[in-house]
Image: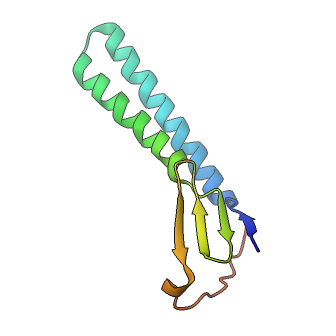
Amino acid sequence: MKTIYECSQSKSVKWITAIFILAMVLGVLTEMYYVSKGINVTGAIIVSTVLIAACLSCFLIFPMYIIADDEGIGIRTLLRTIRIPYENIDHIERVRINHY
């Protein structure tokens, strides 16, 4: 039998993500301004590329679902599903998190 659990973000993670994305957008806009002025064009392109890659990689590796089936547990991201067979699991423990 297959059971799918949706992964959700806490309020803290949502706020941190929003601030991180805003900082990335402001960084890229600042670098675009410097490029338009002709100041350190190569450095601006490199910094903008790194900021955009960092932002995209966060979305690509964020777990979307946890899938439990007869073979093991899978963690689904946008890129792939990571499979963990039951024989590789020593124990499972529920952790309670206080949401503020």
Q: Position of residue 80 (x, y in %)?
A: 53, 53
The C terminus - image quarter? bottom right
Residue at image location 52% in from the left, 44% down from the top: 20
Residue 71, given in percent of the width and then of the height, sits at 61, 76
Residue located at (31% from left, 23% from top): 45
> From the viewer's perspective, is 83 left or right of 69?
left
Q: Is residue 46 left or right of residue 76?
A: left
> In this orientation, which residue lies closer to the viewer: 72 or 100?
72
Residue 25, horizontal then vertical, whole percent: 50, 30
Where residue 12 appears, as percent x and y from the top left, is 63, 59
- Left or right of 33? Residue 2 is right
Residue beneath the point at 33% across and 16% down: 34
Q: In this view, does 23 lie above or below 38?
A: below
- Between residue 64 and residue 74, name the one nearer to us: 74
Placement of 15 over or under 6, stated as above or below: above
Q: In which quarter of the image is residue 11?
A: bottom right
Query: On the image, which quarter does residue 36 sit in?
Result: top left
